[in-house]
Image: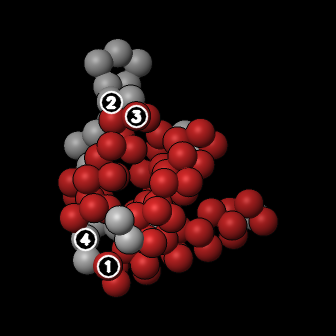
Amino acid sequence: MNELNVLWGPIRSLLEREFSFNSIKELVALSGLDITGIAHLQQRASGGATKGQLICGVDAVYTSIPQDQKKRFLVNLTVTVHVGEIL
């Protein structure tokens, strides 16, 4: 297991615990992850995707990208979340 995958674990947990379904999609998109693989996931009053399913979809996209893209995504995501907290 490499360092970037280890770093993803706590960030993933924070996203799921602290952010809404739509905020998670927005944050990962703003951070540079190609969300076409999770674009079909929608939260609805009944029959929609859960936050857990969304996070699993993000996991699948994250694990499929090269190391340099993982690093860039994690840095961008950390900055995006931090700036959001300041604003």
**What colour scheme has been applied to the protein in the rendered image?**
secondary structure
Label 4 to label 2: alpha-carbon separation: 23 Å
Task: Name the front one of labels 3 and 1.
Answer: 1
Q: Residue at x 31, y 25 (%)?
A: 48
Front residue of this view, candidates 78 and 85: 78
Question: Is residue 59 in sight in this rendering?
Answer: yes
For disc 4, the neighbor class at 10 Å (few under 14, some 14 to 19, many from 20) is some
The residue beneath circle 1 is: 67
Helix, strand or loop at label 1? It is: helix
Q: Is residue 49 above or below residue 67?
A: above
Residue 33 locus on image (x, y percent): 35, 67
Whichever of callouts 2 and 1 sits on the residue coming sooner in the sequence is 2
Q: Is residue 22 above or below residue 1?
A: above
N-terminal-most mark, 3 or 1:
3
Residue bearing mark 4: 65
Horizontal arrangement in the rendering, residue 30 relative to residue 80 (left or right): left
Q: Are marks 4 and 2 in contact (CB under 8 Å)?
A: no
Q: To which residue does mark 3 refer?
A: 52
CA–CA distance in space, label 2 to label 1: 28 Å
Residue where numbered disc 2 is placed: 49
Reading the chain from its start, which is encountered first: label 3 or label 4? 3
Q: Nearer the viewer, residue 54 or 2?
A: 2
From this viewpoint, is residue 73 visible? no
Q: Quadrant of residue 67?
A: bottom left
Crowd band around label 3 with a 10 angstrom C-alpha radius: few (<14), some (14–19), many (20+): few
Crowding at dot 1, Cα within 10 Å, few <14 / some 14-19 / many 20+, comes out as some
Mark 4 vs mark 2: in front: 4
